[in-house]
Amino acid sequence: MCLSEADIALLAARGVTVAHNAESNMKLASGVAPLPELLAAGVNVSLGTDGCASNNNLDLLGELASVATLHKVKNLDATVVDAAAALEMATANGARALGFGGGRLEAGAPAALLRECRALASYIRRA
């Protein structure tokens, strides 16, 4: 997570997407991404889970909570990453990173919705 101001400006200028894997970074003790600075510079930041070798799960909903909480603690600011910003990173920003014109829940937009079933999840973990 060693990005200078010049690095961040270059990422923004080149239209780069940063995949932020907060839980993986915490597990590996690899640092905390300068998320507020990236967002302020206009860098497209999406959320990822990395892989099971560097994260205990692939739970994107858990990643949503982790990214918001991590940056509140890191920046000592309870408003730094609100729920709307975290959801945007997990949906619209991820779609933009992949070149899709979606990622939003709005009239006329394509949607793929998933309903979490905790009972089924426990069976899958045991399989």
Image (spheres, helix red, strand yellow):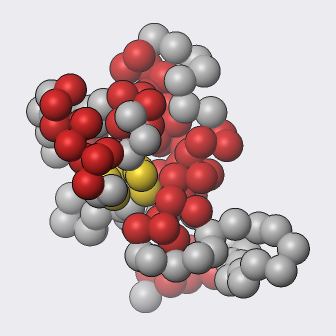
Could you tell whether 10 is left or right of 15 in the image? left
Could you tell whether 91 is left or right of 35 in the image? right
Query: What residue do we see at 54% from left, 31% from top?
Result: 81
Query: What residue do we see at 69% from left, 66% from top?
Result: 104
Which residue appears farthest toward the front when viewing the image? 13
For the residue pair 20 and 93, the one nearer the viewer reads as 93
Is residue 17 among what the camera can see?
yes
Query: Residue 67 in the image: x percent, y percent?
Result: 46, 41
**On the rendered image, what quadrant is the N terminus found in?**
top left
Query: What residue do we see at 60% from left, 21% from top?
Result: 79
For the residue pair 106 and 126, the one nearer the viewer reads as 106
Query: What residue do we see at 41% from left, 50% from top?
Result: 45
Where 23 sits versus 117, above or below? above
**On the rendered image, what quadrant is the C terminus found in?**
bottom left
For the residue pair 43 and 33, the one nearer the viewer reads as 43
Where 16 sits versus 51, above or below? above
